[in-house]
Amino acid sequence: MTEPPTPRKRMHPVVTVGLIVLAIWILLAVCMGEQSLDRADKAASVIAMLVGLGALTVTVVELQRRSAQQDSENSPPNHSSLLKRPSVVTGVATMAVGLLIVVVVGLASGGADTSEEPASEAGGSSPSEPPPTTDAPSVSPSESSPTEPCASPGQAASGVSPTVTAEVVRHDGTLILAKGYYADLDSLCPDWDVTDVAGTKQDIGNDGRGLTRSITAGTQIAVVEKKAAATFAMCSSNTDYVSSAIQYADLNPGDRFCVLTDAGRRSLVTVLRVRGGGDRKTVHVEVRTWAEKQPSEETNYLPWVIGGLIVLALLGGGATSAATKGDKEEG
């Protein structure tokens, strides 16, 4: 008597879809590492999220169809390959079209040129704070936009070097952050527009634990060496961003950080001192913000919102079509 053939084990569809989503996520992160779709990490996260939503939709539709087949006694079991199922084919097709639209919209937005604001030196060190110890690079004598807060059109700077535009300083001065206060490093105001609200323009702040970046503004902070040259090129090349607040214990005089602001500028933050006790400490830092902007790194969520809506609409239509087609085949 021959033994019945052992049925071939099949991977559960949820596991299969999960592995596919993970592979796509890794592929996107690798391929987009040198691209600039409004920051590659954010673009990869958004696209991976959309892929995950699509995969979840396909999985739910497929599991519902299988459950309906098992509940029907007269319906023969369907052993067709998972990749040949109408729900999977339709879902993959809709995700591919949606992702293509998202990438095209992101590239179009990331490559768009934005007008550069004229830069000038405004503000400076607080009277109670010592001046910067490093030599300040050349500052543009151009007048700032009269509509920009705290701009001083009459101020001019000496020692201009017109051939080194990337090293032109926009604002150089002292910043004092009490607990619960945040500052806009793109501001021309002497106090860096300090406020107790972490809005979309405030870049860094004191959250009661240490120096933190504003997630709302999309700011990034990178730790740099104390002996590194205080230049725009140095800050631009340092992209080893931290993901959490820099604790008070790690803020020592002379420590330096490079900040990517919400407007795409680079700021060098040098720790002067940390005063106070407990969680009510005040952080004193020296800030130098360069005028150069990098449009490709500016935070712009609109293309991703539009692309997400398009993908979700396509996924909704694809899932409905797949379910309808599956019901017809079963009938």
Image (tube, rainbow, N blue to C red):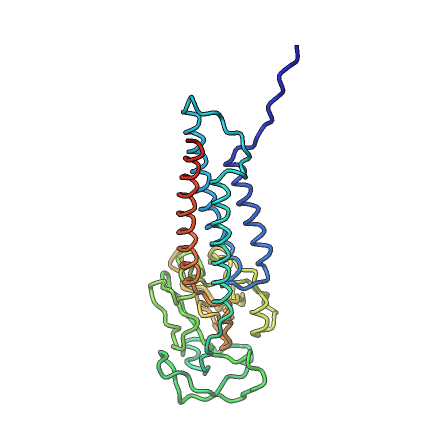
| Image quadrant occupied by the C terminus | top left
**Is 5 left or right of 64, judged from the image as shown?**
right
- For this orientation, the residue located farthest to the right is 2
47 or 160: nearer the viewer: 47
Residue 276 shows up from this direction: no
Give the residue displayed 46% in from the left and 57% down from the top.
245
Residue 33 shows up from this direction: yes
**Is 166 left or right of 130, judged from the image as shown?**
right
| Image quadrant occupied by the N terminus | top right
Q: Position of residue 102 (x, y in %)?
A: 47, 58
- For this orientation, the residue located farthest to the left is 196
Give the residue displayed 35% in from the left and 81% down from the top.
147
User: How many numbered marks does the figure carry?
Assistant: 0
Q: From what the image shows, is residue 282 above or below residue 116?
A: above
Q: Position of residue 175 (x, y in %)?
A: 42, 71
Q: From what the image shows, is residue 253 above or below residue 78?
A: below
213 or 253: nearer the viewer: 213
86 or 28: nearer the viewer: 86
Q: From what the image shows, is residue 249 above or below residue 71?
A: below
- For this orientation, the residue located farthest to the top is 1
Residue 63 sits in quarter: top left
Q: Position of residue 69 (x, y in %)?
A: 44, 28
Q: Position of residue 141 (x, y in %)?
A: 48, 88
